[in-house]
Amino acid sequence: MLIDTHCHLYKEYFDNLQEIINISKNKIVLYFINNGCDNKSNVEVLETTTKYKNVYGALGLHPEMVENYTLSDIKFIENNISNDKIVAIGEIGLDYHYTKDNKEKQKNLFEMQLKLAEKYNVPVIVHSRDATEDTINILKKYNVKGIIHSFSGSEETAKQYIKMGFLLGINGVVTFKNCNLKEVLKNVSIENIVLETDSPYLSPEPFRGKQNNPSNVYFVAKFLSLIYNISLIEVANITTKNALNMFKKIIY
Ligand SMILES: [Zn+2]
């Protein structure tokens, strides 16, 4: 059994979610964590967790929303964080890729949500792009753990996150030809890894460029079985165990 710990199963991308769930079953992908990124998607995430047994949710405000959120959007997260099927606060973090001009605002939004995670003792799902140093320094201020989503950093960065109690979320990026991540992972134990797709983005090879869906987590698992030279079943067992240890609300 495989778990897609990071996807965006919104209506605008997937108009028939039941079909996607059925396709995923054929590839032994049985559980999904639908990640919100703004208030609209957080509302949808909550709806999908009510409607579909195998869909769990994370509620969060993405750094790209830094100019557009209100305090009531934060309140919505807090009001629903104790829901049985909301397993984390995410997708939250820092993204300096397009602009560094709003760094302080981004940090503030990130920290407001980390405070909630600490207060309610729930894991976080962290987006960090071109912002490793600030991400690490901020996470160190809080008593939180969780997933570094779409990890693609250096071995040194990987080890720092692991030491802080975080797992690395690995997706289709690892299958890309010019990606150094495979070399990094050879020196990182699979005990620190969970699988994800980031659907509808980041399709793995051989589907790169097409719309991604959670069933493709199977191809990420297959690729890891080659990197670690273990069977697909072992990859499934270990990464699923890692995810279940982190997200205690998932009923297996
Ligand atoms: Zn995402």
Image (spheres, rainbow, N blue to C red):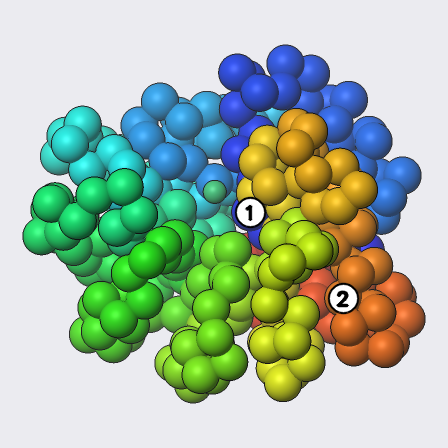
> Going by the image, does 39 lie left or right of 11?
left
The residue indicated by pointer 2 is 224
Q: Which mark is residue 112?
A: none
What x and y, as percent, mark residue 197? 63, 45
Percent x, y of residue 57? 50, 41
How dense is the environment of label 1, judged by Cα within 10 Å: few (below 14), some, or many (20 and up)?
A: many
Q: Quadrant of residue 141?
A: bottom left
Q: Is residue 179 visible?
A: yes
Q: Residue at x 84, y 39 (%)?
A: 25
Asked whether, in this view, residue 138 is left or right of residue 57, the answer is left
Mark closer to the chain start, 1 or 2: 1
- Determine which residue is flagged by label 1: 6
- The kind of secondary structure element at disc 2 is helix
Q: Amino acid at mark 1?
A: His
Count residues near mark 2 (Cα–Cα under 10 Å), then give few for <14, some for 14-19, many for 20+: many
Q: Secondary structure at mark 1?
A: strand
Mark 2 residue type? Leu
**Is residue 105 shown above or below 122?**
above
Query: Does the beta carbon of the residue at mark 1 sit less than 8 Å from ligand 1?
Result: yes
10 or 229, which is in the foreground?
A: 229
- The residue at the point 61 percent across, 25 percent down is 51
Q: Nearer the viewer, mark 1 or mark 2?
A: 2
- The residues bearing labels 1 and 2 have C-alpha atoms spaced at a distance of 17 Å
